Image: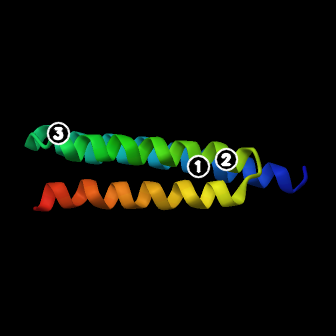
Amino acid sequence: MGGGNDFEKYAVAVIIVFGALIIGGLMAASLSFGHRNGFLFALGGATAAWISGNALLLDRPRIYALFVAIAAVMLIASTITLVA
């Protein structure tokens, strides 16, 4: 029960939260309003977040931060397509 176990818990939380909420929320909203680009941005953001969780599992904090930033930008873009 070392420090690596904590990283695994956080990585699993990132995978679950981004995967379920982003795919379930933004994708459903984009599909229901007929915004294909919003759907694709949400898919890309969820994928980037999932990759970031795996990077954390592999103890790569810089790659983790990069993919979290990519996910955030893509999810903001998805939200903008729904609003605009």
Q: Position of residue 70 (x, y in %)?
A: 46, 56
Closer to the N terminus: mark 1 or mark 3? 3
What residue sits right under mark 3 in the picture?
A: 36
Q: Is residue 29 left or right of residue 69?
A: left
- Which amino acid type corresponds to the residue marked 2 in the rendered image? Ala
What residue sits right under mark 2 in the picture?
A: 55
- At a point 75% along the width and 44% down the height, the residue shown is 58
Mark 2 touching mark 1, by CB under 8 A?
A: yes
Closer to the N terminus: mark 2 or mark 3? 3
Q: Is residue 83 left or right of residue 4?
A: left
- Which amino acid type corresponds to the residue marked 3 in the rendered image? Arg
Mark 1 touching mark 3, by CB under 8 A?
A: no
Q: Position of residue 9 (x, y in %)?
A: 69, 49
Give the alpha-carbon distance from disc 2 to disc 1, as whole Å. 5 Å
- At a point 32% along the width and 46% down the height, the residue shown is 42
Q: Position of residue 35 (x, y in %)?
A: 13, 43
Query: The C terminus appears in which quarter of the rendering?
Result: bottom left
Mark 1 residue element: helix
Quarter of the rendering containing residue 44:
top left
Check the image and name the residue furthest to the right.
2
How packed mark 2 is, by other alpha carbons closer than 10 Å (few <14, some 14-19, many 20 or more), is: some
Q: Position of residue 76 (x, y in %)?
A: 31, 61
What residue sits right under mark 1 in the picture?
A: 52
- At a point 77% along the width and 51% down the height, the residue shown is 59
Give the alpha-carbon distance from disc 2 to disc 3, as whole Å. 29 Å
Give the alpha-carbon distance from disc 1 to disc 3, as whole Å. 24 Å
| Viewer-proximal residue among 8 and 62 | 62
